[in-house]
Amino acid sequence: MASSARPLALRAACSLRAPRCLRSTAAAARQEQPGDPTRPPPPPHPERGSARGGTGPRGTRRVQPPPPAVDFGDPREAFRSKSSAELVRALVVLRLCALEPLVARSRQLMNLSRKLLGQQLFEKLMKMTFYGQFVAGEDQEAIKPLIQRNRACGVGSMLDYSVEEDLTPEEAERKEMDSCTSASEKETGGAAQREKQYLAHRGFGDRRDRVISARTYFYADETKCDQHMDMFLRCIEASGGSSEDSFSAIKLTALGRPQFLLQFSEVLMKWRKFFHQMAAEQGKAGLAAMETKLEVKKLQETLANLGIATKAESQHWFTGEDLGVSGTVDLLDWNSLIDSRTKLSKLLLIPNMKTGQLEPLLSHFTEEEDLQMKRMLQRMDVLATRALELGVRLMVDAEQTYFQPAISRLTLEMQRKFNMEEAVVFNTFQCYLKEAYDNVTMDVELSRREGWHFGAKLVRGAYMEQEQARAAQVGYEDPLNPTYEETNEMYQRCLDYVLEEIKYSQKIKVMVASHNEDTVTFTIRRMAELGIHPSEKKVYFGQLLGMCDQITFPLGQAGYPVYKYVPYGPVNEVLPYLSRRALENRGFMKRAKRERDLLWRALP
Ligand SMILES: Cc1cc2nc3c(=O)[nH]c(=O)nc-3n(C[C@H](O)[C@H](O)[C@H](O)COP(=O)(O)OP(=O)(O)OC[C@H]3O[C@@H](n4cnc5c(N)ncnc54)[C@H](O)[C@@H]3O)c2cc1C
């Protein structure tokens, strides 16, 4: 009988395997293997010299040990940390996740089971199944054994307190509309000058809709934001206590009124668009952001012709130390004109190319809105300060495109402040975005110019269906790559760029956050080609708890820095998160025959 067809009960009964995860001999033996055995040695980089060995202190060349090989097809290694009971649970849960009707009604089924079984039995059932598979435990104490067990296998943790408010879609929609509309817009009943992409739309008010894995926060009031901050603080503290070199994740939509994120995003994107429009006028359309340079003289003429600023006024903008010294202005110089230091944006009117009218770049904030914005920044500051004190890296998650420019920009401000000695704050870049490459390259370049450490997590992006539907329905250009293949290309392009930079810089770190085995294999191969050794801890990997252990654990055993996103929280309060995780696995499991086969083969 084929192993995958053996009856489950029989397999479960015949084993009492205990989890064991000291560094395996197979992994240790492979560690000695010189280079990637499946590939020929890479050619030297044409401009930058030999590939192997990073740059040591004061530019000396370090001789690197050979890179460890990793085998993603060895079931023993993949599930070494799991007991037999856990293997059986994984098989059952992941199999159940592939059953469409069950998963589609998972919330209702969970509620019904709770009613029928009573709270205690229901909790037991959940812990034996879905909760046990995807959630580490109820609180910081309960999750310690799992964290320690993973650590013994070389797998770190990114703690994520996964409690989610259980709102109805109507409640979520109401909260969203209320918190995404400014007082002045409510007063005048409209937002004529706003771009529709950056306005709240009732049909998309429930931001959880069509989003499977990411947790979603809705604004209630400032007290609630303080509670979220306390929750993140506890997470950072637990991360600090759990291991060295740990991460903690936060979401900025939990920390303040989203209206500010929407408006600030709009300003940033209008400003960037304006730069590209002027580039087009200078015959420089279609270049990558970092290759587009405006000639200052022509730029001043355009600004004067548009009635935005006289030559004398704009002369003053471009006489700073960094601006315009070469007679050109790039997008980073341009962006610096609206950073918090110059406050120029408050004064600026920019043309709306459709109406031909000049419009204020930043709309008016009431005193209370201004305070709300400041409090959000203060909360971020409190979190980053604590993370720095405890040696925890703070990962700022990426969210929807109408918030993301602001989230990314605020994260960058934190990096400027907290990443002077090392990368404490990590930004997230979503490679399903058409602009992903520009976003990554601009931030790397800025970090280089200003001398701070760049830390990034690269993901494909979690909000695809919602983003595509919103763009189509509201009527703006879809910000996402049109196909999965193009997203893959974008991911590789961004990753390759960052890895090349890492080879020559001590100030860049990246987390490859993906369940895609090809992406992980590509990263390992490029690291070997570029001579980036895992022991340098410049390239991390990240997967979610309960998913893709066959990728995570072999990486950890081979000595690559790899982390699990570890959700935790009381059973009842993580149910919304759990049912969406089941939904995510529904799609995933259709492709994950390999994981199931490996699980079967791991059973004794
Ligand atoms: C540790 C960790 C942290 C994460 N943090 C974040 C975060 O902060 N923000 C966030 O948005 N996501 C985050 N994610 C989720 C991530 O963005 C992906 O949704 C998820 O990991 C699936 O992508 P993949 O690379 O693992 O697998 P794959 O299955 O290879 O990729 C699936 C992804 O490809 C993209 N895609 C699929 N079809 C198309 C198409 N037709 N056109 C264009 N693109 C397409 C989508 O982004 C889809 O989610 C995180 C994931 C992990 C593992």
Image (cartoon, rainbow, N blue to C red):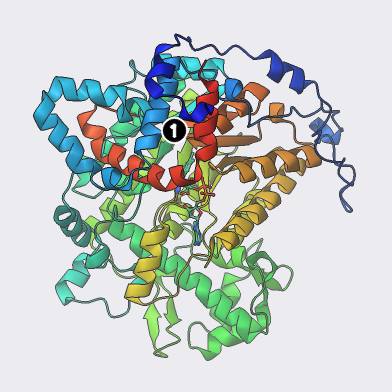
Q: Report the front residue among 567 and 598.
A: 598
- Horizontal side of residue 31 vs 393, given as left or right: right
Question: Eyeballing the image, is 169 above or below 269?
Answer: above
Question: Residue 481 at what x, y percent from top left?
Answer: 53, 65
Residue visible at 21% across and 23% down in the picture = 123
Residue visible at 26% across and 26% down in the picture = 126
Question: For residue 522, which quarter of the picture?
Answer: top right
Question: Residue 324 at what x, y percent from top left?
Answer: 68, 69
- Horizontal side of residue 140 vs 201, given as left or right: right
Q: Amino acid at mark 1?
A: Thr
Number of residues whose C-alpha sits closer than 10 Å to that of mark 1, classed few (under 14), some (14–19) or many (20 or more): some
The residue identified by callout 1 is 385
Q: Is residue 241 visible?
A: no
Question: Residue 517 at what x, y percent from top left?
Answer: 60, 41
Question: For residue 401, which quarter of the picture?
Answer: bottom left
Q: Report the front residue among 77 and 58.
A: 77
Question: Residue 483 at what x, y percent from top left?
Answer: 54, 64
Residue furthest to the front in view is 1
Question: Eyeballing the image, is 345 above or below 518?
Answer: below
Q: Report the front residue among 489 and 283.
A: 489
Residue visible at 89% across and 53% down in the picture = 46
